[in-house]
């Protein structure tokens, strides 16, 4: 039985991989398909304080993980995700934070013939700078409406030339390159992250932080509202509870005609408005019943005129209620408190 000889160089790579994998609590797998070396180098530089990117052949990555199964429980779960072009991203930083950073720092990328489109490829109205010729037929074959302006071809209407999930054909790729359009974004993104023996899928690592902020704000406001209405005192609810109590006490004293330093001006204002409303009602029945001074006061308060009908109705209703009820002894403010 023959044995496969493993070069010393590969052995050293596996040893280094194992050392790296055991030196960080978070092991991520990131896709590097369709990413050029300059983008990887830029991300390495941007992440140097938070993470380390380690690349190796898939076979060597699998060997390193298999050798660590006993030392790092659950690490073998990563094996099924080592497919295609990928690399390790090792870190001590929260993987959610890393995923957000990488998503926000993607760069425009050209379309390559044969690749699957991660999003719709759209060409908007523009002057192509291309002179008329056979290329017009190619553009029209892609569903683009064209016209000639100033001796150059102009794309007249927006059109989708490749839909999300479809392969980019060679004609589209060449046209996009000629028009200097980079329809995609490229950068590192998590396939999975491994932490404390558990696998977290890459999609789950991208959180909508704005929605979380809105939800937390709603929860805070709801809890504060409940505390205030229940009279449950906290640092946040105390001032609102006291303010509510003050307002209720002030309303009570005004409605009861109980004079205090705070209620006096409100009671007088209420009395003036009431007298003006009564005067307006009387004036509607017989304007001669009011003095010239009273008439002048009414003309200075036109808003009272707008409420005449309402006041009259209220006075009539009160009169009917009083005629139906027996007169009660006026017990004063003290009766409010038993």
Image (cartoon, grey):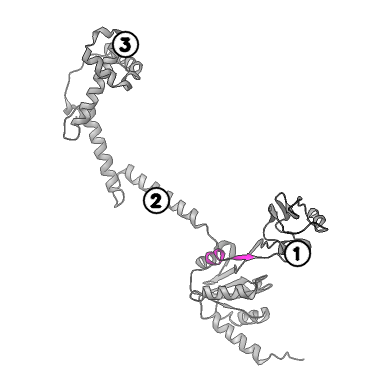
The magenta span reads 100-108
Instruction: Indicate which label's residue lies in the foreground, 3 or 1.
Output: 1
Q: Residues within 10 Å of mark 1 (few under 14, many from 20)?
A: some
Residue at label 2?
Answer: 220
Name the residue furthest front: 150
**What is the quadrant of the C terminus in the image?**
top left
Who is closer to the viewer here, 36 or 233?
36
Element type at mark 2:
helix
Residue 306: give x, y in percent of width and height.
35, 19
Q: Residue at x 78, y 62 (%)?
A: 171
Seen in the picture, residue 238 relative to 11 is either above or below; the reply is above
- The mark that comes first in sequence, 3 or 1, is 1
Q: CA distance from mark 3 to mark 1?
A: 86 Å
Q: CA distance from mark 2 to mark 1?
A: 54 Å
Residue 83: give x, y in percent of width and height.
68, 72
The numbered mark at residue 174 is 1
Who is closer to the viewer here, 199 or 41?
41
**What is the quadrant of the N terminus in the image?**
bottom right
In magenta stretch: residue 64: no
In magenta stretch: residue 105: yes
Q: Residue at x 55, y 61 (%)?
A: 206
**Looking at the rendering, which quadrant does residue 67 occupy?**
bottom right
Residue at label 3?
Answer: 284
**Looking at the rendering, which quadrant does residue 173 occupy?**
bottom right
């Amino acid at each position: 039985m023959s044995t496969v000889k493993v070069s010393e160089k590969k052995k050293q790579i596996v040893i280094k991989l194992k050392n790296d994998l055991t030196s960080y609590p978070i092991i991520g797998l990131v896709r590097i398909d369709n990413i050029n070396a300059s983008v990887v180098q830029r991300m390495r530089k941007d992440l140097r304080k938070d993470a380390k990117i380690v690349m190796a052949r898939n076979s060597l990555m699998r060997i390193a993980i298999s050798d660590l199964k006993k030392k790092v429980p659950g690490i073998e779960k990563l094996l099924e995700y080592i497919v295609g072009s990928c690399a390790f991203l090792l870190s001590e930083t929260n993987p959610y934070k890393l995923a957000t950073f990488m998503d926000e720092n993607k760069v425009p990328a050209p379309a390559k013939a044969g690749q699957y489109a991660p999003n719709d490829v759209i060409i908007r109205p523009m002057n192509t700078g291309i002179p008329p010729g056979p290329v017009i037929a190619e553009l029209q074959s892609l569903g683009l409406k064209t016209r000639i302006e100033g001796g150059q071809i102009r794309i007249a209407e927006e059109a989708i030339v490749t839909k999300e999930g479809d392969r980019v054909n060679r004609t589209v790729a060449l046209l996009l390159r000629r028009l200097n359009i980079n329809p995609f974004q490229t950068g590192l993104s998590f396939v999975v992250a491994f932490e404390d023996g558990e696998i977290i899928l890459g999609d789950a690592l991208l959180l909508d932080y704005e929605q979380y902020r809105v939800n937390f704000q709603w929860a805070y406001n709801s809890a504060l509202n409940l505390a205030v209405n229940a009279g449950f005192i906290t640092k946040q609810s105390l001032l609102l509870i006291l303010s509510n109590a003050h307002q209720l006490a002030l309303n009570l004293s005004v409605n009861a005609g109980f004079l205090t330093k705070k209620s006096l001006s409100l009671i007088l204002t209420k009395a003036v408005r009431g007298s003006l409303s009564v005067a307006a009602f009387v004036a509607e029945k017989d304007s001669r019943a009011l003095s010239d001074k009273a008439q002048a006061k009414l003309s200075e308060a036109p808003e009272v005129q707008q409420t005449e009908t309402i006041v009259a109705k209220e006075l009539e209703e009160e009169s009917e209620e009083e005629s139906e009820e027996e007169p009660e002894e006026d017990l004063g403010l003290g009766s409010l408190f038993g």
